[in-house]
Image: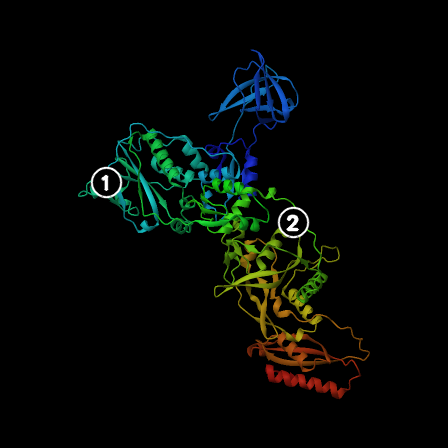
């Protein structure tokens, strides 16, 4: 939301600088996204006059802050409690000064200067604007009036309204009844009539035009512009109709008008319109929440509830602006109220408030704070019954009121306390111990750890398509933090993108963090481990002339090395899959102990192109819960006895994965089979016709206690051959 300083100043009468206003809003949860602040003459500052006395006809004495006295020549006016504009160098000296008066937008400023013949200072006040991210539960501040009302509660300064008095008002004899689908959502509605009006003859005022253009709104005609202007300023929706057309529609009914707000086509205002009816409805919170969901209509974000007095005020203001531009005679305001709902009060006990806050706040302070918020109070000895105003939708329960009390009381006013406690050292957690060892292992290989936020935005949702449902946050801190993350991959890819901008060409990073998954209206937290590689394998060097780029086998090798180190490789396997985030050709799911634990492969090219990355990204993501095996290694003596190698050449179908063959070979004899490697793969035309391939497997056999004889080695090899025939339909070549 954009808010302009001069527009805010119309209601918020304060000497606060724009920077002070920003700091006040920041402290109270309003995120200032972007501010365009233009300082007026940096060498000059504002000061308030505390004391003023005329010494003689030619000289007078004034006092400002910090007991600084100044003498001004040729003064006639009383400057007490008025602002002066003075040079920084002249503040600390008791010297005689000259002054002159200047008017900027109806405000008189007194400028003090040293030299009589000095040129007058030109004060150019540019439009300062604040771009504010308003919290989700505070959409009552989505308009100018709402923001100034909130500022007045945060600081002692009051917000004021101009009084619009219309003379020679005409009588309003018409009684309106609204017939509409949304009738149940209307609390009350107020209306007035303007007769003998000349629409479209005159243009909209320049102030309204300027302010609308700065908000990127194109002005159409005077009446539409004025209604939009009032909506942005107050949050009050104002509807207008042609009175003569309504009368024709209701011929038989004398002075009684039945009006359907949703069907406005029959009563559209045009150039011939002479009599106008203006209605200001007050809506229920359910209707406002319903409307706010429609993001495409920009008007909806400004709509808000206000109290009945301000409803009258802004209805009078619209009639005053219209009369000023287009002429006409204005009637008095008539109100139509529906049946009053039973007023619900929140019961607050003083002791409970102080218990929740942790400090004792006096009753007077609590009452004053609640009055500031415009709450209706029934005060008793130990309790207060509080009725919250219409526009404060965020104050529903006791806890909301307690939070508001401490916010307005000021977090800085809470006294500091030192606590004397004993430090209790818990035993090391087994789960944390394993995670630390995983981190150490991957940092030793050359990876670097990364920690990202637990949130993601709507762009991530569309780019990184995932099978899981995203969990939306009701009151997000900012637009970039609207959803809880379901994967660590988006954050890691963004990290690569930022690193490539800083000319890093070889990146190996990993992250261990929680992800949030929704299943059957239940939210689950899962600890996930993810790693990403990108760019060149080796650093730039005179020796390596050809630059090798990371490929799928690099990240696969790192993961296999991890399982091999802790003797769990026989439980590890990968199979082809169809993840949307990964490329079609290099797309696998990771299986551990016959359970799917994650994914591995090459990042989708569309995502790579979106981030304009030169090289492909290879990654894997694993659920840590499924790999919580004991990683404490026992130290054993190195075997003194020789190892034996045997090669087996087989022909197998193309669809069989090599990792499955290696895994099954290890299971044949876990104690004596130390290594299983694929040496060669071969194909020819005959094999390709039959969809088969030729593979040579090398098996390393060793015993820790004795030297193995040929008979026992052959037994192990024969068992491997039988297993290969049975499980993979392998044809063994001698």
**Side of 506 where 186 appears, left or right:** left
Residue 27 vs residue 720, the one in the foreground: 27
**Side of 712 where 15 appears, left or right:** left
| Residue 336 location (% of width, % of height) | 30, 42
Residue that mark 2 sits on: 502
Q: Residues within 10 Å of mark 1 (few under 14, many from 20)?
A: some
Q: Residue lying farthest bottom?
A: 711
Element marked by disc 2: loop
Q: How is the image coloured?
A: rainbow
Residue 137 vs residue 519, the one in the foreground: 137
| Residue 201 location (% of width, % of height) | 31, 30
Residue 486 vs residue 600, the one in the foreground: 486
Choose the circle earlier in sequence order: 1 or 2.
1
* Vertical order, 715 against 290 (above or below): below
Observer able to see residue 596: yes
Q: Are marks 1 and 2 in contact (CB under 8 Å)?
A: no
Quarter of the picture containing the C terminus is bottom right
Q: Residue at x 56, y 77 (%)?
A: 691
Element marked by disc 1: helix
Residue that mark 1 sits on: 245
* Vertical order, 260 against 100 (above or below): below
Observer able to see residue 731: no
| Residue 457 location (% of width, % of height) | 52, 53
């Amino acid at each position: 939301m954009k808010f302009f300083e001069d527009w805010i100043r119309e209601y918020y009468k304060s000497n606060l600088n724009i920077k002070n206003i920003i700091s006040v809003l920041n402290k109270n949860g309003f995120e200032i996204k972007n501010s365009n602040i233009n300082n007026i003459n940096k060498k000059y500052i504002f000061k308030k006059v505390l004391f003023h006395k005329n010494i003689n006809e030619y000289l007078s004495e004034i006092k400002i802050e910090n007991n600084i006295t100044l003498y001004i020549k040729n003064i006639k006016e009383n400057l007490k409690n008025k602002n002066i504009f003075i040079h920084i160098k002249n503040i600390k000296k008791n010297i005689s000064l000259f002054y002159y008066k200047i008017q900027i937008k109806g405000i008189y400023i007194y400028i003090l200067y040293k030299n009589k013949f000095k040129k007058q200072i030109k004060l150019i006040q540019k439009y300062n604007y604040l771009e504010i991210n308003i919290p989700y539960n505070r959409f009552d501040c989505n308009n100018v009036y709402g923001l100034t009302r909130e500022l007045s509660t945060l600081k002692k300064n009051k917000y004021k309204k101009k009084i619009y008095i219309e003379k020679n008002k005409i009588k309003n004899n018409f009684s309106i009844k609204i017939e509409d689908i949304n009738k149940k959502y209307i609390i009350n509605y107020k209306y007035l009539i303007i007769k003998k009006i000349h629409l479209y003859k005159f243009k909209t005022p320049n102030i309204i035009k300027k302010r609308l253009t700065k908000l990127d709104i194109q002005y159409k005609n005077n009446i539409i512009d004025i209604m939009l202007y009032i909506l942005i300023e107050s949050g009050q929706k104002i509807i207008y109709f042609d009175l003569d057309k309504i009368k024709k529609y209701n011929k038989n009914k004398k002075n009684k008008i039945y009006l359907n707000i949703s069907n406005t086509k029959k009563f559209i205002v045009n150039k011939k319109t002479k009599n106008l009816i203006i209605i200001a409805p007050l809506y229920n919170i359910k209707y406002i929440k319903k409307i706010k969901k429609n993001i495409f209509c920009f008007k909806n974000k400004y709509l808000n509830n206000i109290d009945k007095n301000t409803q009258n005020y802004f209805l009078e203001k619209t009639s005053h602006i219209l009369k000023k531009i287009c002429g006409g005679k204005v009637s008095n305001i008539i109100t139509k109220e529906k049946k009053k709902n039973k007023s619900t009060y929140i019961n607050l006990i003083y002791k409970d408030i102080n218990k929740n806050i942790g400090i004792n706040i006096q009753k007077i302070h609590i009452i004053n704070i609640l009055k500031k918020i415009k709450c209706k109070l029934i005060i008793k000895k130990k309790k207060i019954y509080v009725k919250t105003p219409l526009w404060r939708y965020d104050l529903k329960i006791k806890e909301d009121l307690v939070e508001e009390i401490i916010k307005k009381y000021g977090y800085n006013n809470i006294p500091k306390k030192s606590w004397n406690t004993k430090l209790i050292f818990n035993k090391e957690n087994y789960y944390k111990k394993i995670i630390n060892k995983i981190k150490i292992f991957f940092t030793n290989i050359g990876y670097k750890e990364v920690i990202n936020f637990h949130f993601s935005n709507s762009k991530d949702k569309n780019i990184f398509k995932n099978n899981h449902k995203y969990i939306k946050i009701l009151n997000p801190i900012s637009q970039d933090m609207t959803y809880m993350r379901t994967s660590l991959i988006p954050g890691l890819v963004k990290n690569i993108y930022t690193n490539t901008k800083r000319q890093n060409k070889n990146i190996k990073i990993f992250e261990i963090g929680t992800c949030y998954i929704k299943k059957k209206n239940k939210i689950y937290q899962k600890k996930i481990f993810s790693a990403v590689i990108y760019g060149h394998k080796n650093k730039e060097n005179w020796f390596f002339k050809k630059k090798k780029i990371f490929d799928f086998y690099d990240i696969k090798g790192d993961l296999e090395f991890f399982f091999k180190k802790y003797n769990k490789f026989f439980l590890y396997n990968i199979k082809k899959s169809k993840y949307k985030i990964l490329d079609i050709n290099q797309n696998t799911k990771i299986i551990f102990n016959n359970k799917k634990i994650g994914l591995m492969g090459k990042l989708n090219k569309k995502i790579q192109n979106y981030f304009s990355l030169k090289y492909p990204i290879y990654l894997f993501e694993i659920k840590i819960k499924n790999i919580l095996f004991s990683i404490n290694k026992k130290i054993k003596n190195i075997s003194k006895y020789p190892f034996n190698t045997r090669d087996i050449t087989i022909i197998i179908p193309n669809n069989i994965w090599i990792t499955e063959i290696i895994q099954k070979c290890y299971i044949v004899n876990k104690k004596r089979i130390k290594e299983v490697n694929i040496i060669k793969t071969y194909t020819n035309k005959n094999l390709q016709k039959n969809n088969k391939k030729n593979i040579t497997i090398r098996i390393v056999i060793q015993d820790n206690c004795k030297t193995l004889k040929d008979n026992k080695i052959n037994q192990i090899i024969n068992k491997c051959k039988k297993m290969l025939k049975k499980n993979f339909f392998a044809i063994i070549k001698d």
